[in-house]
Image (cartoon, grey):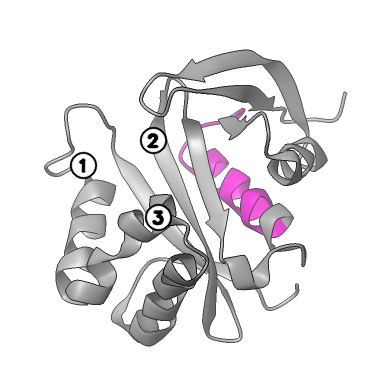
Amino acid sequence: MKDVCLVLPSKDYEKSFQEYAISYKNTEDNYYFEKYKHAIENFHEYLEGLYKLSEGIGVPEDSVRTTNYWLVDNNNVVGVVRLRHEEIKGAGHIGYDISPCYRKKGYGSEILRQAIEKAREIGIEEPIVTCNINNLGSKKIIEKNNGLLLGIVIDEEENEELYEYKILSRKV
């Protein structure tokens, strides 16, 4: 994982990111495919939207300023992380996903580790992270990154139970 890094979305990764989006379609994961399909339809417009969101321009009423990063390994986008500059109840500060093709290879732990560093750079010392209670892989990733379970919250939009964690700034 030594050459794996978070980068800001850019035209340099257009083909790779479009392949990333298609990987969700190929595995019939419509939730994430819907999130990324605009990058296939109009990549420039998609990037412009991410840039505006990161600058706090035109943020939807139910959202907050959010900086997206792509986890890149050998010029391939393998994951996406959304760093929210304020906590959203039921979603926390950090949301991430790894391409179905790259799961169970350590990228989940790495993307969260690097996202925690980015959060601290903007003043969020102990970010909140959530995961679906059935997502045991994400639960392990969060706990590996010093996550302290706070309890269970309900994501009313998705109508699902989530574990809510605080990422501690030091080991307990």
The label on residue 85 is 2
131 or 61, which lies in front?
131
The label on residue 30 is 3
> Closer to the N terminus: mark 2 or mark 1?
1
Label 1: how many residues lie within 10 Å, few (<14), some (14-19) or many (20+)? Answer: some
161 or 60, which lies in front?
161
Tell me the SS state at disc 1: loop
Picture quadrant where residue 22 is located = bottom left
Picture quadrant where residue 84 is located = top left
Question: What is the spatial separation of the Cα atoms under label 3 and label 2, in whole angstroms?
Answer: 26 Å
Where does residue 106 sit, x and y in percent of width and height?
77, 62
Q: Which residues are magenta?
A: 110-126
What's the residue type where badge 2 is placed?
A: His
**Does the segment drawn in magenta span residue 6?**
no
The outermost residue toward the left is 58
Check disc 1 and report the residue beneath it. 56
Q: Quadrant of the C terminus?
A: top right
Where does residue 115 sit, x and y in percent of width and height?
57, 49
